[in-house]
Amino acid sequence: MVFLSNPQVWHLPGTWSEQPIDGPYLGMNSGQLSWVAASILLTFLIALCVYIIEMRRSKRKRSS
């Protein structure tokens, strides 16, 4: 279905071009995009650490 779209997706700017996507296509510049990506990654890592800690605590309680 993507190939039947009008206008064709490969003619739209930023879809399959060789240029990096920046600014007007995403509504953010590089710095803002970096902050958003870092905050998402940091949130994911904190949640993963909390999950691992809770799993270890529950294993300790079961073995005791």
Image: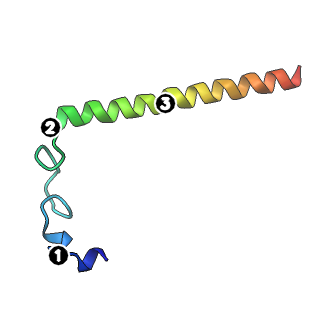
Q: Earlier in the sequence, mark 1 or mark 3?
A: 1
Q: Residue at x 20, y 62 (%)?
A: 15
Q: Earlier in the sequence, mark 2 or mark 3?
A: 2
Q: CA distance from mark 1 to mark 3?
A: 40 Å
Q: CA distance from mark 2 to mark 3?
A: 24 Å
As drawn, which residue projects farthest toward the right? 64
Contact between marks 2 and 3 (CB within 8 A): the answer is no
x and y percent of residue 2 in the render?
28, 74
Q: Is residue 63 left or right of residue 14?
A: right
Q: Earlier in the sequence, mark 2 or mark 1?
A: 1
Q: Amino acid at mark 1?
A: Asn
Q: Residue at x 77, y 25 (%)?
A: 58
Q: Secondary structure at mark 1?
A: loop
Total residue callouts: 3
Q: Which label belongs to residue 31?
A: none
The N terminus lies in quadrant? bottom left
Within 10 angstroms of label 2, few (less than 14), some, or many (20 or more) residues? few
Q: Is residue 43 positioned above or below 8 on the image?
A: above
Contact between marks 1 and 3 (CB within 8 A): the answer is no
Residue carrying label 2: 29
Within 10 angstroms of label 1, few (less than 14), some, or many (20 or more) residues? few
Q: Is residue 41 left or right of residue 23?
A: right
Name the one closer to the observer, 61 or 6. 6
Q: Residue at x 10, y 46 (%)?
A: 24
Q: Secondary structure at mark 3?
A: helix
Residue carrying label 1: 6
Residue carrying label 3: 45
Q: Amino acid at mark 2?
A: Asn
Foreground tag (2 vs 1): 1
Q: Secondary structure at mark 2?
A: loop
